[in-house]
Amino acid sequence: MSDMADPGASTEAGGRPSVVLGVAGGIAAYKAAELLRRFTESGHDVTVVPTASALHFVGEATWAALSGKPVRTEVWESVHEVPHVRLGQAADLVVVAPATADLLARAAHGRADDLLTNVLLTARCPVVFAPAMHTEMWEHEATRANVATLRRRGALVIEPAVGRLTGVDTGKGRLPEPDEIFAICQDVLARGVAAPDLAGRSVVVSAGGTREPLDPVRYLGNRSSGRQGIALARAAASRGAEVTLVAANVTLPDPAGVKVVRVETTEELRDAVVSASGSADAVVMAAAPADFRPVSATDRKIKKASDGSAPALELTQTPDILAEISHARLRPGQVVVGFAAETGDDTGSVLDLGRAKLARKGCDLLVVNDVRGGAVFGADDNQAVILAADGTEADVPPGSKTALAHAVWDQVARRLEPDTTTHGPD
Ligand code: CTP
């Protein structure tokens, strides 16, 4: 709960955020039980509204026991409480997981043929859909159009994950892990903003530390965990962006709704970032690429010499990806962001070195971390100053990596040229 801010005024009487968990009729409904537990165990007041088909997969007793509340699917039950209007009106968040092709179609067309679709029509809070279906159904033109309609109206539709589907099939259409859907929902609730402000934007985030091979078992690496990059990717996804995460040796779970490209070396990181950046509105280089690599890696393990001597390593510089994409500007108006971990030295303070680096790299924003005393690496919290090429600087107080991620996207959003293609009325 450390990332949870005050979710706003419309919480139920006890001050607990009020969540409606819609469950549509897909096999991934069983994962929604885990999502429900995450919500209830962290103090949310959850009403589960399954569709009639969802109950074929997971029965009413499970939802009632886990939420501690009666469960309804139709508008004809407890009519005196007017649930078809009241539930949506009172919610701080409506999340539908899994959202099937049929549910997305009914929501996009404004149908009100069961309790869940009525809730969707009456809710004025943020609405999150976590679709899950077979790849063919997700890619069908009808589903694409329905998803586009829902996004245009301000809903957050999380991209499904790629992986094992029902039966023997694999592909895009898998429900993201409950923990990751929960993280997005927490983020949306904490921000309390009804419409995702990065909808229609495409962003690239790099994360982790590269490894430069010496021989088949050894490499030169660094201590970057990838946590800040993951937080940036997740925050952008929760603000509606289409996110590509280029992950160098990251072992943390994939954030929901994010396309993950895995790389190992700086050269591979460069190729993946450059290739994804051609269509990106913003690129954030949170990875720690190795600055040097061995001139050549041997294909046999380097053995210890019997005379006690150690091999001399000849190193060469790796490409500076941030400088390259900043100078190339692969898409007009693209906002490029770098990170710098500095300790300061005889030539200047942490911020002096940050300003010099910002100018040298040619990026729009540089997030400067003070790492004196080994702060930041692997930690959950972070603090920084965001320096901008226009001379402004924004202090980000100590807080979570999620909070820093949002501070970065706030600065990026301010610098993006207005998007005339995806917003506005249907
Ligand atoms: N970076 C990069 N390519 C590299 C090295 C770094 O794109 N080969 C990016 C990092 O992702 C980060 C920024 O550059 O966003 C600053 O990284 P840093 O290591 O501080 O920069 P260096 O140019 O390596 O400067 P220093 O000599 O201070 O290490």
Image (spheres, helix red, strand yellow):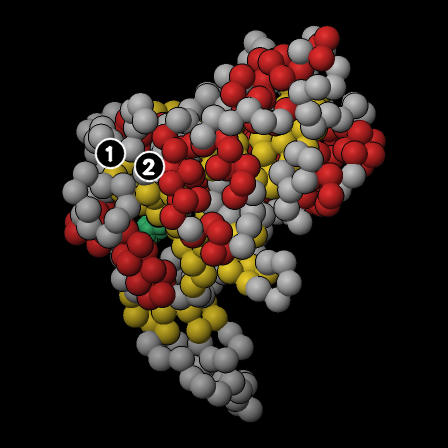
Q: How crowded is mark 2: few (under 14 residues within 10 Å), some or many (20 or more)?
A: some
**From what the image shows, is residue 297 above or below residue 212?**
below
Left or right placement of residue 366 versus residue 137 in this view: left
Mark 2 sits near ligand 1, with its Cβ under 8 Å away: no
Q: In which quarter of the image is the C terminus?
A: top left
Name, please, the residue furthest toward the bottom.
306
| Residue bearing mark 2 | 200
| Residue bearing mark 1 | 421
Q: Name the spot of residue 145 as percent of width and height, x first.
A: 38, 40
Left or right placement of residue 405 versus residue 39 in this view: left
Q: Which amino acid does label 1 sit on?
A: Thr
Q: Name the spot of residue 48 as percent of width and height, x first.
A: 70, 28
Foreground residue, 219 or 167? Answer: 167
Q: Name the spot of residue 87 as percent of width and height, x first.
A: 63, 17
Foreground residue, 230 or 215? Answer: 230
**From what the image shows, is residue 395 above or below residue 54?**
above
Q: In which quarter of the image is residue 260?
A: bottom left
Q: Name the spot of residue 30 as percent of width and height, x first.
A: 71, 45
Foreground residue, 315 or 72? Answer: 72
Spatial CA distance of label 1 from label 2 is 8 Å
Q: Residues within 10 Å of mark 1 (few under 14, many from 20)?
A: few
Q: Quadrant of residue 339?
A: top left
Image point (34%, 43%), residue name: 203
Image point (57%, 9%), residue name: 9
Image point (80%, 29%), residue name: 64
Q: What residue type is labelled 2?
A: Gly
Q: Is there a contact, CB below 8 Å, between mark 1 and mark 2? A: yes
